[in-house]
């Protein structure tokens, strides 16, 4: 069982930046795809960025491309989501998930999920 923990959520003004972290207790993430998903109130969960940690393949949703960057640390224990130029529409609970498949933004490809971290972007 892979236990994922997200951190780094906060409240920021539009144009601000945040870095979210996703860590697996006691596991290396090297053999997984890690996806960042988000769910805003009243909306479906959306896959926004995914990385296959072992080969570095990456996917970004159009809504975040050019503003968000997904990466992993050198020892493959943490995946980050660097978020820049944040907008009010980025307000959501952000989840990380781990799966055995490729770096794709399909929820059913991911087997393990964290509890989420809140990101709020407002004036």
Image: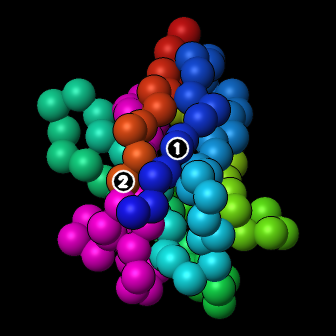
- The image position of residue 72, as x and y in percent, is 71, 65
| Quadrant (top left/top right/bottom left/bottom right) for the N terminus | bottom left
Verify whether residue 107 appears in magenta: yes
Looking at the rendered structure, the secondary structure element under dot 1 is strand
Residue 59 shows in this picture:
no
Q: Residue at x 55, y 61 (%)?
A: 65
Q: What stretch is highlighted in magenta?
A: 88-112
Q: For this view, does 49 lie left or right of residue 22?
A: left
Residue 78: quarter of image: bottom right
Q: For this view, does 68 lie left or right of residue 63?
A: right
- The image position of residue 30, as x and y in percent, is 63, 78
Q: Quick one: 22 or 123, which is closer to the camera? A: 22
Please give the residue where the numbered disc 2 appears in the rendered image.
113
Q: Looking at this view, name the residue that lies furthest to the bottom.
A: 55
- The image position of residue 62, as x and y in percent, is 44, 63
Mark 1 in CB contact with mark 2 (< 8 angstroms): no
- The image position of residue 79, as x and y in percent, is 65, 59
Give the spatial CA distance, label 1 vs label 2.
8 Å
Q: Which residue is drawn at 64% across and 46% down?
A: 21
Q: For this view, does 37 lie left or right of residue 73?
A: left
Disc 2 crowd, CA 10 A, few/some/many (<14, 14-19, 20+)? many
Looking at the rendered structure, the secondary structure element under dot 2 is strand
Please give the residue where the numbered disc 1 appears in the rendered image.
5
Q: Quick one: 18 or 102, which is closer to the camera? A: 102
Q: Residue at x 68, y 48 (%)?
A: 82
């Amino acid at each position: 069982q892979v236990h994922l923990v997200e951190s780094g959520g906060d409240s920021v003004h539009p144009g601000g930046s945040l870095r979210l972290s996703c860590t697996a207790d006691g596991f290396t993430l090297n053999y997984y795809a890690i996806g960042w998903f988000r769910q805003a109130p009243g909306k479906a969960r959306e896959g926004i960025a995914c990385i296959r940690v072992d080969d570095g393949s990456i996917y970004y949703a159009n809504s975040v491309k050019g503003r968000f960057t997904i990466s992993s640390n050198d020892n493959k224990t943490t995946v980050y989501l660097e978020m820049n130029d944040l907008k009010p529409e980025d307000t959501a609970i952000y989840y990380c998930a781990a799966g055995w498949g490729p770096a794709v933004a399909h929820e059913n490809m991911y087997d393990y999920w964290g509890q989420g971290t809140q990101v709020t972007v407002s004036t």
